[in-house]
């Protein structure tokens, strides 16, 4: 694979007051990626947008024969969801239009169950080729996706994640599973080791394992992958004992790391900025590429607090202030271009949209793109056109960020409601620190109910008479059901019979 022109000459960048060389990372490309050439047909597509070009050889159906003249949808208003945190999720009073209105909207009662909607329409034609239109989005196109969506995610990435390197590129994908599969093809050879969290996302492992990639687990704690454990694994690497060959003169296998730093799946752990910087510095030391799979980034909820200690926000923060409260991406520390970030619209718009994007240095971005050119090709035009119309032409950056704020608070309330429901049927108290892989994490212990749920608090004898324990998640998605309280009653009854048998 030929290097992009931007990567041929030695680049330098200022880091902590000194000028440092940006390393050539092309040795990380897989043999498959090095042998892969650009698809000539897909390369031709980029010339179609140039004014004055008349193509006679594209093999493209004429848009007039597309049966769709326009696509229309009713979408929720960007401020449909409150940004305040509920004081209590267990009030059982009748539906009102008051402070618990959000609660009744979950189960279909009350005024807020009928959300305000707005109309969007994508026509078949618009004046400029680069405008969102069905004649383009439903046509054969480039694997990068349609231009307005490319532009939006690129600008969004630089505004929100603030990558250290201004050359960071964004490439549209069909979601993070597709993106991860492309990265594996682009970087990994059969027999390579892959650094992962001790407990890792199963689908990611099932994606990489058919390629012959061998997982190398690294111990975890309440923040996810431990930096000291990572250092130990790499410093004490025994090639003979591990059965993994040396990848290049400068490093041993493994040379790629996969992790989910926010709402880690399955532990729910959230990695601090300090830990990310430590892991990044180790990656620089041992020449490791970091793949940051971050679908839950905007669902950072913070520590769980009992209802009596729960603070209620009264106003939505402006976009910049709210974004500053979120943990930074690895991109913010990445002065060498060794981070590949995976983002998705699955958790913020809809999973069925099958849309996401990869942010990486130009070399890796091109390698990922070339895999897409001969596999998924361009993402589905219907999904691209509707999501683009919503985000680019209807909401824009600020309104989309306000939507994300509402989602964050909704999922925080759902997380709180789940734990509140447990506390309504069990005495829940602060327990001992978590053992084993989540050592140091906060643990809540649940036992037989002897008091009102309103007395939720801390026991003098921590962990005594515990029926079960759990670690309150700090990020991620939590399913809410109207039968949750009833489910907790049934669970309490079953456990009561079990422990008294």
Image: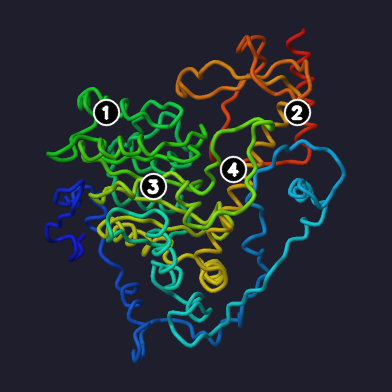
Horizontal side of 461 relative to 495 (left or right) equals left
**Which residue is rendered at x = 41% and y = 81% of the image?**
59
In the picture of the structure, the residue carrying the numbered disc 2 is: 488
In the picture of the structure, the residue carrying the numbered disc 3 is: 329
Q: Earlier in the sequence, mark 2 or mark 4?
A: 4
Q: Nearer the viewer, residue 61 or 6?
A: 6
Horizontal side of 316 relative to 495 (left or right) equals left
The CA span between labels 1 and 4 is: 31 Å
* Residue 388 percent coordinates (x, y): 52, 69
In the picture of the structure, the residue carrying the numbered disc 1 is: 231
Are the residues flagged by discs 1 and 2 in contact, CB closer than 8 Å? Answer: no
**Which residue is rendered at x = 72% and y = 37% of the image?**
88
Are the residues flagged by discs 1 and 4 in contact, CB closer than 8 Å? Answer: no
The CA span between labels 1 and 3 is: 21 Å
**Disc 1 or disc 3, which is closer to the eye?**
3
Are the residues flagged by discs 2 and 4 in contact, CB closer than 8 Å? Answer: no
């Amino acid at each position: 694979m030929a290097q992009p022109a931007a990567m041929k000459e030695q680049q330098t960048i200022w880091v902590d007051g000194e000028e440092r060389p940006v390393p050539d990372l092309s040795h990380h490309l897989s043999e498959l990626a090095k042998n892969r050439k650009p698809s000539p047909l897909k390369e031709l597509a980029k010339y179609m947008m140039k004014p004055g070009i008349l193509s006679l050889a594209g093999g493209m159906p004429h848009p007039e024969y597309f049966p769709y003249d326009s696509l229309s949808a009713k979408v929720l208003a960007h401020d449909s969801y409150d940004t305040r945190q509920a004081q209590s999720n267990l009030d059982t009073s009748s539906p009102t239009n008051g402070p618990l209105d959000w609660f009744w909207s979950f189960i279909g009662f009350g005024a807020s169950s009928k959300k305000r909607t707005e109309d969007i329409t994508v026509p078949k034609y618009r004046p400029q080729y680069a405008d969102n239109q069905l004649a383009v989005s439903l046509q054969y196109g480039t694997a990068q996706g349609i231009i307005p969506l490319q532009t939006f995610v690129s600008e969004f990435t630089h505004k929100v994640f603030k990558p250290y390197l201004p050359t960071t590129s964004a490439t549209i994908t069909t979601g993070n599973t597709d993106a991860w599969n492309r990265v594996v093809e682009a970087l990994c050879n059969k027999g390579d080791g892959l650094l992962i969290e001790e407990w890792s996302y199963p689908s990611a492992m099932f994606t990489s394992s058919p390629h012959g990639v061998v997982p190398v687990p690294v111990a975890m704690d309440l923040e996810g992958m431990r930096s000291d454990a990572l250092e130990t694994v790499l410093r004490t690497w025994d090639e003979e004992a591990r059965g993994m060959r040396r990848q290049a003169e400068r490093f041993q296998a493994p040379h790629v790391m996969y992790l989910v730093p926010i709402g880690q799946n399955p532990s729910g752990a959230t990695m601090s900025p300090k830990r990310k910087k430590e892991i990044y510095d180790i990656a620089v030391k041992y020449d490791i590429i970091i793949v940051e799979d971050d679908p839950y980034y905007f669902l950072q909820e913070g520590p769980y607090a009992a209802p009596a200690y729960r603070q209620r926000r009264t106003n939505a923060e402006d976009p910049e202030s709210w974004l500053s409260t979120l943990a930074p991406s690895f991109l913010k520390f990445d002065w060498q271009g060794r981070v590949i970030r995976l983002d998705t619209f699955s958790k913020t718009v809809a999973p069925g949209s099958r849309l996401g994007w990869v942010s990486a240095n130009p070399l890796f971005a091109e390698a990922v793109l070339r895999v897409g050119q001969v596999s998924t090709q361009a993402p589905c035009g219907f999904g691209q056109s509707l999501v683009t119309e919503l985000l680019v032409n209807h909401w824009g950056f600020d309104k989309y960020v306000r939507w994300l704020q509402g989602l964050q608070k909704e999922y925080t309330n759902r997380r709180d409601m789940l734990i509140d429901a447990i506390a309504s049927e069990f005495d829940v108290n602060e327990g001992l620190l978590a053992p084993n892989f989540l050592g140091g994490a906060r643990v809540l212990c649940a036992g037989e109910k002897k008091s009102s749920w309103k007395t939720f608090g801390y026991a003098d004898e921590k962990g005594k008479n515990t029926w079960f324990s759990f670690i309150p998640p700090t990020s991620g998605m939590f399913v809410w059901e109207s039968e949750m309280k009833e489910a907790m009653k049934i669970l309490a009854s079953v456990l009561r019979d079990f422990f008294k048998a």
